[in-house]
Amino acid sequence: MNVLILTDFTETSENAGRYAIDLFRSQPADFFLLNIHEFHSIKSRGQITRETEETLNMLKNVASRFRKYSRNNAHNFHVTVSSDGLISAVRKTLKDKKIDLIIIGAANREKHEQPILGDHAYDVVKKIKCNIIAVPSACVYGNLQNAVFPIDHGILSVNEHQDILENLNYLRSSKFTILEIKDSEQDNPVLALDRSQNGEPVPFTRNLFKDIQKKYDLILIFGKNLNICERLLHSEYGFSAKMTVEIPIFVYHA
């Protein structure tokens, strides 16, 4: 398993890294730490070289902390500093390192001015076709016993969603609840989750997501379902811009 961890040296991104290590605690994995460093054009070549070396050393220190935290000899840690744009750097890493999963730290709205994921990380969710887990800043890995998978059968068939769950070997221990949803923005605060579990399609609304966070350890979203992705993740008008997200968000890309 090759896992890309995007880091900006904040506690939020380090927490996401620890979450990734715990997720693969009992199996071999290569973790690739990527930091994007922007250089100002007015700086000399010598200044840019020094900044690159300093950033690389900081990244190596993060990798060292992760290595100590892991205590798994089958875990390997690699570091990369890139001056490319975020999307270009991630795409290059995906191709060069054959990445299977991306881990992103997701700051809660109370902790940072930016909502969950921020504008740049939301670009990763939209533009990068790779499985992604966004880990909220206060989230600690558990056993992921209960996970929820909202699906719209107009986008994803029964056989397709079963194939997705079978492909996610590292979530095999999770019990998935399938929630059938429909494309609507009408919010009904009355037992939205219960109605969906009883077989009645319901809109994917803020109230539904509040219910989900109380009962589940992770939410799995199909990347092609743009309606759910935007409603939950968009940094300006998504739920995450106005509420605290407490559970990891797994965005699955076929």
Image (cartoon, rainbow, N blue to C red):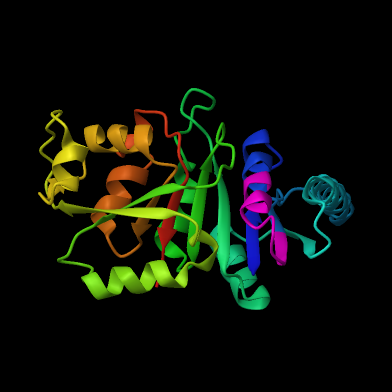
Give the side of residue 53 with respect to residue 87, left or right: right
Q: Picture quarter containing residue 232?
A: top left
Q: Position of residue 51 (x, y in %)?
A: 83, 48
Query: Would residue 106 be seen by someone viewing this image from the given angle?
Result: yes
* Residue sitting at x 21%, y 39%: 193
Residue 7 visible: no
The verdict on residue 60 being magenta is no
With respect to residue 97, does 45 lie above or below?
above
Question: Looking at the picture, does residue 246 appear above or below residue 228?
Answer: above
- Whole-percent x, y for residue 254 in the image: 39, 73
Front-most of residues 60 and 149 = 149
Q: Position of residue 76 (x, y in %)?
A: 79, 63
Q: Quadrant of the N terminus?
A: bottom right
Percent of width and height locating residue 200: 10, 49
Whether residue 89 sits left or right of residue 221 in the image: it is: right
Tally of marks: 0
Residue range of the region highlighted in magenta in the rendering: 18-32
Identify the residue at horizontal 42%, vertical 71% (top origin). 166
Q: Is residue 88 above or below residue 97?
A: above
Specify the quadrant of the image occupied by residue 246.
top left
The residue under the point 30% across, 32% down is: 210
